[in-house]
Image: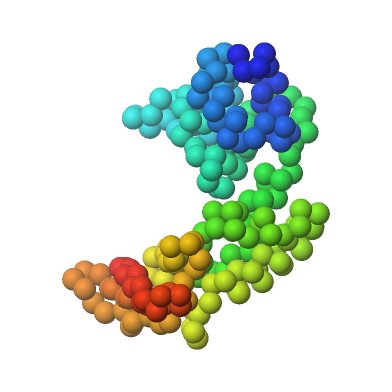
Amino acid sequence: MSDNLSPNDILLGFVSGKITAQTFHDMVCSDRSLQIYLDQKSNLIARLIKKDDNDDPSLVNLLKSFNPSILAERFEIFYTITQLLNAEGVKYEYCKSYATEFFVVIDCMPYYVFDPDYVTNKILPTIPEQYSTKKKIKQARKIMKKEFKCKSKKPDWLQSPEWPYDSYGAPLYFLHQTKPIKDGRCYKSKFVFLNKKTGEEVIVEQFD
């Protein structure tokens, strides 16, 4: 068992923020006692566990499927464990940063950009931790607007936003998009971006 912690201690340590999402995920993947404990509790939150023909109705497998380095999936791990503790009637103190981080990231992104990991890794670390949630969102929106620049109009994506980046991970400059044209059964549009450092244009094609 991980550092002589009981399964219940591990769950409480995770939701309280004492155990990181990555460490908790590693424990789920390697700690046999924790795996047995979790699967014994699977029936308590069956509605959260996939039960397709190709899926084993296992809480362990559900938790293993999440990637803790991805914001939305990190929140899913947190949400799943809090639901389990609620179902068991266990009292706990939860780490507000999990939920706060998720909502700050979602609320600060404009409609034409969707990259939670960029916000989490590039923007949130530059904002003082002591800021209120409202102030964090306001500050993050300013930074997003400054970094995801457009020559005039914003991209009107045909599918989910696919904003490209340069080799250093910085967002490219949006120039324009072509008018959607019929391409077989679909409509196609090209979104043209500029790498200001190299002068190279990058084209993103989308179909609808």
User: Residue 156: where, in percent of width, then height?
Assistant: 44, 75
Question: Which one is nearer the viewer's eye here, 64 or 80?
Answer: 64
Q: Is residue 194 left or right of residue 43?
A: left
Percent across and percent down for residue 157 are 41, 71
Res 21 visible: yes
Q: Classify 6 as above or below 137.
A: above
Quarter of the C terminus within the rendering? bottom left
Residue 7 shown left or right of residue 54 in the figure: right
Work out which residue is located at the far front of the displayed protein and give it: 198
| Residue under the image location 34 percent in, 70 percent down | 204
Q: Please, is residue 186 above or below residue 181 in the view?
A: above
In the picture, measured across the screen, residue 130 lies left or right of residue 178, that is right
User: Is 179 or 152 nearer to us in this picture?
Assistant: 152
Look at the picture and state if 4 lies above or below 130.
Answer: above
**Relative to 92, is 174 on the left or the right?**
left
Judging depth in this view, the residue of 197 and 203 nearest the camera is 197
Figure quadrant of the N terminus: top right
Determine if residue 80 is in view.
Answer: no
Counting from the top left corner in percent of width and height, residue 63 is at: 52, 31
As drawn, 192 above or below 169: below
Q: Give me the residue at 76% from left, 63% from top.
A: 135
